Amino acid sequence: MEKLEDKTIVTNTAFGCTDCGADLKYKPGTTYLNCEYCGAENQILHLDTKIEAFDFEEYIAKEAQLKTANKACFIKCRTCGASSNLPPNIVSASCPYCTTPLLLEQAQEEEVLQPNSLLPFEIDSKEAKHKFKEWIGSLWFVPNTFKKATLKFKHFNGVYIPFWIYNAYANTQYIGQQGNYYYKTESYKALEDGKKVTKTRQVKKTKWHSVKGMVTNFFEDRLKVATNSIPEKYINELDFWDLDALMPYNKNYISGFITEKYQIGLAESFELLQADFEPEINNTIRKDIGGDTQRVVSKQIKYTNVKFKHVLLPVYVCAYHYKGKVYQFLINGSTGDVQGKRPYSWLKITLASFVALIIITIISITVYHYTK
């Protein structure tokens, strides 16, 4: 496993005075923040960390150890960049993601990290097409010509999509502020019966004090798709993947299906996934800070005991050209859930809006005459 670098994040947020709550500014040449309102000097806290340099050769050597020699022939799509491993004895094929014809003579043998597990397809092509028909039929404002085009199923493929799955501990040192509410009575002027009067009101204030601490988060079975060929939002919206049903990698399960090679490598994938961890880490920090409200000023995250799996998950992919655009649809090969992009018929939307306007007008006239 390669060495994972620590990550320091500084949030661009105001730092509140521990005496009056006002925003502070750093006073150059000192080790404190100065309050321009009450004159208080707020000491700057420091994280107990060391500045380290990482050995590049060691990093490369460890990264190389992760690869298992697994040679396979892949054909790269010249339009979307997807690399697919097609079933044997195929004489012609199109890219499952964008329908571009693939040049089979350009297939190349590549060495990749072999998946160590996969989730076999649970539904067949016939059932997947039925799910797709139901989904298309349920959509509002879809052009009729598009429905007819999609139901021809000219481009409908079962594809094993590459994913990385991670388990990781995130140990986070943080500097923050705990805020506690208190109320102060203030006087203000108001008009009452045409006369100026003095009234009082309770105004909520916040008392801040600085804190620092350490929290730990455990992230288990976190998925990150390893392809750029499909918008990630569609993949993420596909419903539940039963990861407990993962099987050891066996070429028998991929027979007859297309297998895509990962485009996003292990290190890059984990770096991208860390952005997904941030909100959970911030919530844990806020709980640890306590009080009525919190500020996370800075934090340093160190990931430890990172484990990963390279897995293949089953998806039926539909790709169609319609009026110069490519529309992709995904069907979960385990559950039959359907996600994807769809065009809109502006004629249908206009007619529906017109009908709705007529109905609203009729109801308004009826109510007017009834109440008159």
Image: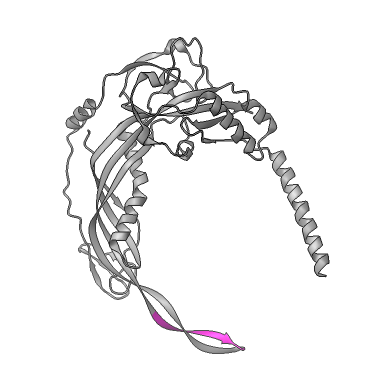
Q: Which residue is found at the position 44% from the left and 21% from the top?
A: 258
Q: Magenta part of the protein: which range?
A: 184-193
Residue 215 position by quadrant: bottom left
Looking at the image, residue 298 lies above or below residue 274: below
Q: Is residue 11 visible?
A: no
- Residue closer to the observer: 163 or 274: 163
Residue 48 lies left or right of residue 366; in this view the side is left
Q: Is residue 84 magenta?
A: no
Q: Quadrant of the N terminus?
A: top left
Q: Which residue is found at the position 51% from the left and 85% from the top?
A: 189
Q: Position of residue 95 (x, y in %)?
A: 50, 21
Residue 211 lies left or right of residue 334; in this view the side is left
Looking at the image, residue 39 lies above or below residue 79: below
Q: Which residue is found at the position 46% from the left and 12% from the top?
A: 104
Q: Position of residue 315 (x, y in %)?
A: 47, 29
Q: Is residue 93 visible?
A: yes
Q: Which residue is found at the position 39% from the left and 80% from the top?
A: 184
Residue 351 lies left or right of residue 333; in this view the side is right
Looking at the image, residue 215 lies above or below residue 89: below
